[in-house]
Every structure is written in structure tokens, then in C-alpha cells.
Image (tube, grey):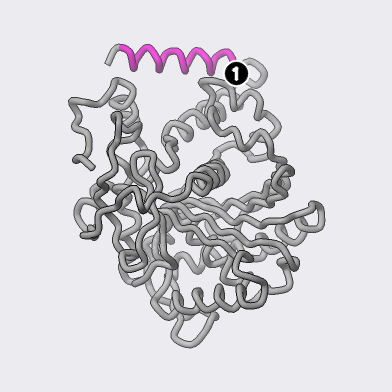
Amino acid sequence: MPAPTSELTLSPEQRHMYASERLVNFRLISKLVASRSSYVLSENDLAPAPLHLELSTLGQFAELVYSPLPIAFVFDNLPLLLSPGFPLEGYDALKESLFVTSFRGTVADLSAYVAYRPQSRQLVMAISGTSSLLQATYTVRARRLSHTAGEGCEVHSGFWHLYKGLKPQALNALRESLEEHTVDEIVITGHSMGGTMCHLFALDLLTEETDIIPNGTVLKLAAFGAPRCGNWALVQRWHKAIKDYRAEHGEAAIQEYAVKGYNDGMLSTTVTCAANRSRPLYYVHGQLYVIPETESERALFDCNTSVQQIPNHPRGGHNYYNGRDMERASRRMNWVKEMQNKYKGNWEELYRKRVEEERKRIENR
């Protein structure tokens, strides 16, 4: 794959996209410390198309949890928010879903919600990544603490405190949601630190809270851009928990997907926690690859598959998974919040005017 597209070849929309960034994308960290694999990904490594589509779909739920608006408000106003120019344009999986409940942790107000997808009988729990300065202070607390999973298991201290503050509410939300809906699959998903929270929660479901998952129900984990959270002993305990669960319930009873992204330096942070959880996937320029097991700790890969046009997000980064610009969605969600609070019933037309003003600025770049 050629080197990242230069500034001169960016479209006006892409130049505006990067000029508008306000979130941390960790591209510099990726450049400085990310480990590059000598293995070149090819078409033989491409993930099956149905898997790519499914993960992109589940990513919509993982991204929505960052909403500055109450999740219940979002679901109540989905027809409008999914409209062209509105923040959730393209998030089509949401319109076929039902809001179940939302909750927050007692440590740093970490947010999460549960939605139900009637057509697939999926219960989706999405846990937020870092969305406040207070939460960010926990992500840099990288001491190792003993984890209850077993002897020698250690966990990132900041992540552990955040998780312990969220766990009781997550368990209650899952129990109540399972009582209300017919469920074939439980999906736990999150982006960034939210993906780490998902792994910690799934580990508890497999080892401590084993009575919650009904027999015959699939547990599916989808994490995007999640940092490392534990030492090698904890990773081994995770693998053993999966092996034991499959031995009892069948190979398909649990499915785990950990997606890395091109130029996402988040994957190289928290260096005191030495290992990733599993054999991950790699997302770059609209394509998803299955990484060879021997290369699972590498963060960057070259690809020899052809890209026929300039990628939508050529620089990669932490907030550009699944072909979507999370920066743009976040910015426009904040516009809705600002205008809805200030103008109440008159905010929709003012929002459209702001979108039109942005479009004109892009044209004039």
C-alpha cells in the first residue's frame, strides 16, 4: 500500500476534516513508538465480507455511546438525527433497534447503554471510552494491581477503578434486559477504553457471574482501538476462560473481535501492561484484515492490496474506524445539544443553517 496521502492530494472535505479535529487521534504516538510488522497483509488476509459488515454495524453502537445527548433522547429522535446532514447520517442499524436502558458508573461518571435489535435478537451493551478530563486522569494511572481472576494476574489500575465503578450497574442492566427480551446473542462493544471495559466485563461473565448468560445464548465481544489492560498472566487467564466456556457450551458460544486501526497509537500506550487479549483484526482504508497470530502484538502493517481511490480517512487515527468520522459525528451532536438546549422547538432549522455554513466553508478552502 502506498505511503499516506500527502496534504496536496487531500480533497477540500478532507482538509476541512483534519482542520476541524479536536479529539486526540494518537497518530504522533503511532509514528514514534508503534511496532511495525514485517508481514505484508494481502488479499488472502482479508476478513470475510459478512464479518466486516457486522463489525461495522456493531461499531455504530460503540460510537453512539459517546453522545453528549441522553441516549434516550437520541432514540426518540432517530428519524431526524439519521437524516442527511444530521449527526447520525449513515448509522442505519440504529433505526432497527430499540432503546432499553442507560446507566453510569460511580467512578468518573463513565457511561453505557443497552439496545435491543429485534430482527437479530441481539442485546447490545455499549460502554463509552474516555470522554472527559476526569476519565482521562484514570487512563494514565498505569500501576499494576492484582486482578481477582487468578494468581499472578495484574490489571491497569486506572482501568480497574473505572470498571469496578461500572460493574454493578452493568450486571443489573444485563439481567433486567434479558428478562424483558428474547435474546439469541449478547453483544458487548466499545471503542478505545470502552473496549477495555468490555474485556474486563466479559471476563467476569465467564468466570464470576456465570449464571447470567442463558444457556444457548451467544456472547459476542467487539472492541475497537482498545488499549492493553493487563499482564501476560491475565491474558492467559482470558484465553483459558474462553477455552473452558467453549468446551462446555460449544465453539460458537463465544466470539471475540478486537479491531486495531491504521495509525492508531492508542494501541501502543499503557506499556506497563504487556499484552493484548487475542488475535486481532486490522482496519485500514476501508478494508479489514485478519492478522496472523504470530503478529498479534504489532500495531502497523503494510498491505499489498490495491486501493483504487483516495481513502476517505487517509491518515488513519483513533477516531476513524469502520469508515466513519467520529470527530464529525461528535461535533454535530454537540451542535444539536447546544441548539436544542437554547432554542428548544426551533433548533432544527438553525442546525440546518449551520450545516450549510460549514458546507460553504469547505467549498471555499
Identify whether 308 is placed above or below 174: above
Q: Residue at x 72, y 42 (%)?
A: 119
Front residue of this view, candidates 172 and 106: 172
Front residue of this view, candidates 159 and 274: 274
Magenta residue check for 352: yes
**Residue 126, percent from left and from top:** 59, 51
Q: Would residue 203 be found to the left or right of residue 363 on screen? A: right
Which quadrant holds the N terminus? top left
Identify whether 60 is placed above or below 188: above
Disc 1 is placed on an element classified as helix
Which quadrant holds the C terminus? top left
At label 1, the amino acid type is Trp
Please identify the dominant SS of the magenta region.
Answer: helix
Magenta residue check for 231: no
Q: The magenta stretch spans which residues?
A: 347-363
The quadrant holding residue 241 is bottom right
Residue placed under numbered mark 1 in the picture: 347
**Residue 220, percent from left and from top:** 59, 59
Q: Residue at x 55, y 76 (%)?
A: 243
Front residue of this view, candidates 295 and 150: 295
